[in-house]
Amino acid sequence: MSDTTPTGLDVTSRKDVDLLHSKAVGLIGVLFLTLTGSAPITAMLLNVPIVVGNGNGIGAPAAFLVATVILLIFSVGYAAMASKVTAVGGFYSFISQGLGRELGMAMGFGSVVAYAVFEPSLCGGFAYFANLKLQALFGINMPWPVLALGMVAVIAVLTYFDIKVSSAVLGVALVAEVVILVVFDAGIFAHSGHGAVVQAAALNPMAAFQGFPAHDKLAAGAAGIGLFFAFWSWVGFEMAPNYAEESKDPKRIVPLSLYISVLFLGVLYTITCWAAQSGFANIDAAIGEAQNSSATFFFDTATKLVSPWVAVLMSYLILTGSFACGMAFHNTTSRYLYSLGREQIIPAAFGRTHKHYKTPYNASFLQSIVAALIIIAFAVFAGSNNAATQAYGELYGLMALLGTIIILSAQAIVSVAIVVYFRREHPEDHHWWTTLLAPILAFVAQVYVVYLCISNMAFLGGGFAFAAYIPWIDLAVVVFGLLYAFYMKKADPAKFDKIGRLVYQGVPDPGIIGHNE
């Protein structure tokens, strides 16, 4: 098979497909759109205390280091696939091309659900921190659903406009997050030997696979919990292929953005985790703080060793970071829905783009409705008067867990799809490392992380009964997608043949551009 897609499946040659805004963003724009999905400050302030206090203890930075290496290996094959298949469908398109339309449809549905629940999850986190801030500043205890739904509304408005608007908003949020984390890290390491205890043993890769026993009134730590939360911190970087059709040079920009994202986040996460635990007199003190007062794990250290204003800025940036992260996942979900809509897997209306802004506005509105309904459901069944338990513990934690299992599973399946795709379609480009060994190693690692998640579900689910149903809900979604694909194969073969096959080959012909303007 050549690199040239049959004309009938190239979206730029079809008059029945509404196009996205071609060449709207460059490398920096794609990085802004994807890195904010990983939400660096949210990942650090929420996940590091768990990795330190319930996972690896002294080896917490090593857990992030090991995750960096494994995700970099995954990116090798993922980037190779992105250089061949340019499509807004991401996992859906890649798996369809490599392992068949049926499995592609199954994981396409799974991916839509995963990214769809991430937005309300982040709205729950935002509502929790916003409520704390309102109480601290004005003594106002606002019901968390109001704050969460307010975030959905603002995201709905911003994502209606050109993707450049989203890129700009997310870029500002991302830069602010990174700057404050770098200032925090520099401030801690500057106090090495003068209040900060920096230990090289924290970076020993073997420490990533070790927990610690219970002692001195401290609960034991499990390496599996630490590793899972380390991997969880990257969810979002894999969204780069979903913006391929809107980037200026997708076959170069998408692979490059994947490598940059993994390495950049890996370095930032490892150093920040190392700095955070180094801000205590010894590792037991760090573990104790993480277990008993995780909310102040960063703030107290920043106040003591860096500056009070750093802690204050962090308390505001956790709000902007949560908002930006939710917006990034909203953008990705709407593009998955758009991909399914233009292939008429779901109503074709969701495959339409705005006449002026070229955004998938119908799909975007659908995602806003879904996010709002999930928030309302939690408010009805969990309650609306306790932001800490209901918004943060249940909405944020449980929905993030539900989506993360699917994303990690999809990454594992994509790794297999890469091997099959290159051996069958591009044997001339099949390479022992890039499209064989690296994807195989990535598959094994991702399966292991999913195993860690499921085997530690009681802890990860915060003790909530709903957590026990999460793996089964995820499985049911994937099975539904699979059965729907088999039904479509029999009932509508022409529609089935398009599953995951509409791709973008370049700038549309001038004579075709007008069809959606």
Image (spheres, rainbow, N blue to C red):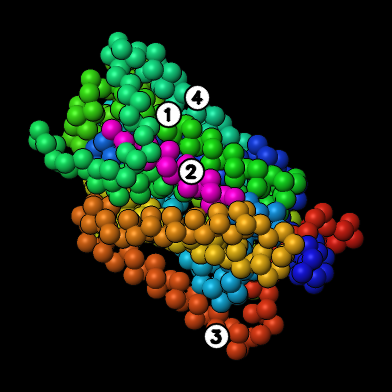
Distance, label 3 to label 4, CA atoms, is 51 Å
Query: Which residues fall within the magenta stretch?
Result: 58-76
Residue 349: numbered disc: none
Residues at circles 2 and 4 in contact by the CB criterion of under 8 Å: no
Q: Which mark is residue 271?
A: 1
Question: Is label 1 or label 3 in front?
Answer: 1
SS state under label 1: helix
**Rendered location of residue 502, percent (x, y):** 71, 67
Q: Where is mark 3, residue-wise?
A: 487
Circle 4 residue: 179
Compare marks 1 and 4 and give the one earlier in the sequence: 4
How far apart marks 1 and 3 lie (CA) works out to 50 Å
Secondary structure type for disc 2: helix
The answer to the question of whether label 1 and label 4 lie on touching residues, with beta carbons closer than 8 A, is: no
Q: Where is residue 485 shown, x and y percent of the image?
A: 55, 79
Q: CA distance from mark 3 to mark 2?
A: 41 Å
Q: Nearer the viewer, residue 488 or 407?
A: 407
| Lateral position of residue 161 relative to residue 293, left or right | right
Q: Residues within 10 Å of mark 1 (few under 14, many from 20)?
A: many
Q: What's the amino acid at mark 2?
A: Val
